[in-house]
Image: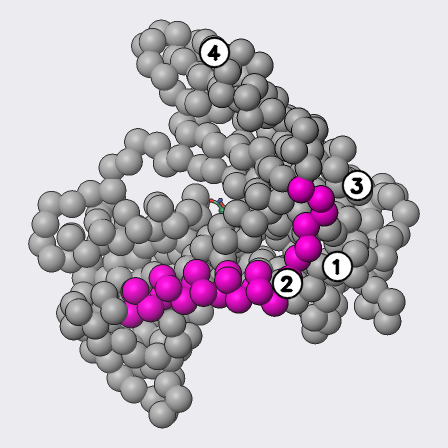
Amino acid sequence: YATLGGVCLNVGCIPSKALLHAARVIADAEEMGHFGVAFGKPATDLDKLRAWKESVVAKLTKGLAGLAKARKVTVVEGSAKFASPQTLEVHTKDGRKVVSFDNCIIAAGSQSSRIPGLPYDDPRLMDSTGALELKDVPKRMLIIGGGIIGLEMATVYDALGSKVSVVEFMDRLIPGADPDIVKPLARRIEKRYEKIMLKTKVARIEALPQGLRAHFEAADGAAGPAPETYDRVLLAVGRRPNGANIDADKAGVAVNERGWIPVDRQMRTNVPHIFAIGDIVGEPMLAHKAVHEGHVAAEAAAGHKAFFDASVIPSVAYTDPEIAWVGITEDEARKQGRAVGKAKFPWTASGRAIANGRDEGFTKIIVDEETHRVIGG
Ligand code: NAD
């Protein structure tokens, strides 16, 4: 792509945050109505909102281009594949270009996963990139996948006025998080959204002139809810690593069958002068993890004794309400056979939360009863 910054800056975290901020302000204004300050229905100028989101992205990608220039980084625009353990072949607008290296860091990321039976050539079927383009505010929108992307985009489109439905394969939303902490979110969106279908999948979608008609199936293969027609559908069922797309074998770099590139704690692949970081090396696929891994790889390549030694990596879903977690969940601790202790502080006792009119949340801490250490929160 012509801009640096990858998925997070261009079509991920950053445009999401810009739109989620707008959603937050709309929701705050609506909530104030209950406390005696009414603002009325928001008048949304979609072109302006989109332009603002794009300006946020442009500011950061321009900054990155400036940084790269100041540090005398040569940027080659094109699609690269390994040609040997010391060279890459890059397809650029001006033809093929060979780039040689002493050390290399692979940071080629991931792409949206797909499921069979969907009309991928229909623009009304979107992935996260399409949803962030904000072409319009669909009257009815189906989100396939009740994970972080699905529910963050649901937060945006619900605030802008879409009737949102979510279909999730598992028996709960954000399956990776502690089920307790997802409950306040689940309770709020069950009331606000049109429908939340758990233990359900989309068997196929028909592209009709009047909309996308989704046929549902229960997760166990039994009959699902009746088909429904939506103006747009967002597919957010996870992301898969791009490891299989870079001819890593020509450099001798091992890639596993799912496309991940295994690395050691210095982010080295099996080829010592080739490193890999970010989504392509494994879960969690989080930008803050990738940035830190990038630092470690660069330092290790420069001969420093740097290691990726984070004992925990925090996660957050910028939904409404937000959910943040770190360490292991109560379930995981029990599965590990630990003596689990827990403490819960309800925000109905928090002055700040009550004053905000948002006291549905709580703080939960998981403790190992033997070591008396906090192991999750
Ligand atoms: P995810 O793994 O968080 O969620 C995907 C969901 O889709 C899961 O709940 C899964 O059970 C469900 N699913 C899978 N197949 C399905 C099917 N056929 N039908 C219905 N449901 C199905 O993945 P995502 O939301 O696509 O996000 C991708 C990655 O991006 C994640 O690793 C996430 O951590 C990262 N991300 C992070 C943030 C953040 O940090 N705030 C924001 C967005 C994305």
Q: CA distance from mark 4 to mark 2?
A: 45 Å
Residue type at mark 2 is: Leu
Q: Is residue 145 visible?
A: no
**Which numbered marker is on residue 342?**
4
The residue closer to the viewer here, 11 or 281, is 11
The residue pinned by badge 3 equals: 195
In this rendering, the label closer to the viewer, 3 or 4? 3
Compare marks 3 and 4 and give the one earlier in the sequence. 3
| Residue at position x 36%, y 92% in the image | 94
Q: Is residue 287 magenta?
A: no
Q: Position of residue 135 (x, y in %)?
A: 65, 67
Instruction: Answer with left or right where residue 31 lies relative to residue 245.
Output: right
**Which numbered marker is on residue 138?**
1
Q: Is residue 59 magenta?
A: yes
Point out the stretch of residues depicted in magenta.
Answer: 39-65
Q: CA distance from mark 3 to mark 1?
A: 15 Å
Residue type at mark 4 is: Lys
Q: Position of residue 136 (x, y in %)?
A: 69, 64
Dot 1 beta carbon under 8 Å from ligand 1: no
Compare marks 4 and 2 and give the one earlier in the sequence. 2
**Which numbered marker is on residue 46?**
2
Instruction: Answer with left or right where residue 196 lies relative to residue 349.
Output: right
Label 4 sits on a secondary structure element that is strand
Compare marks 3 and 1 and give the one earlier in the sequence. 1
Quadrant of the drawing holding the N terminus: bottom left
Q: CA distance from mark 4 to mark 1?
A: 43 Å
In this rendering, the label closer to the viewer, 2 or 3? 2
Label 1 sits on a secondary structure element that is loop
Query: Does the CB distance between marks 4 and 2 fall below 8 Å?
Result: no
Q: CA distance from mark 2 to mark 3?
A: 25 Å
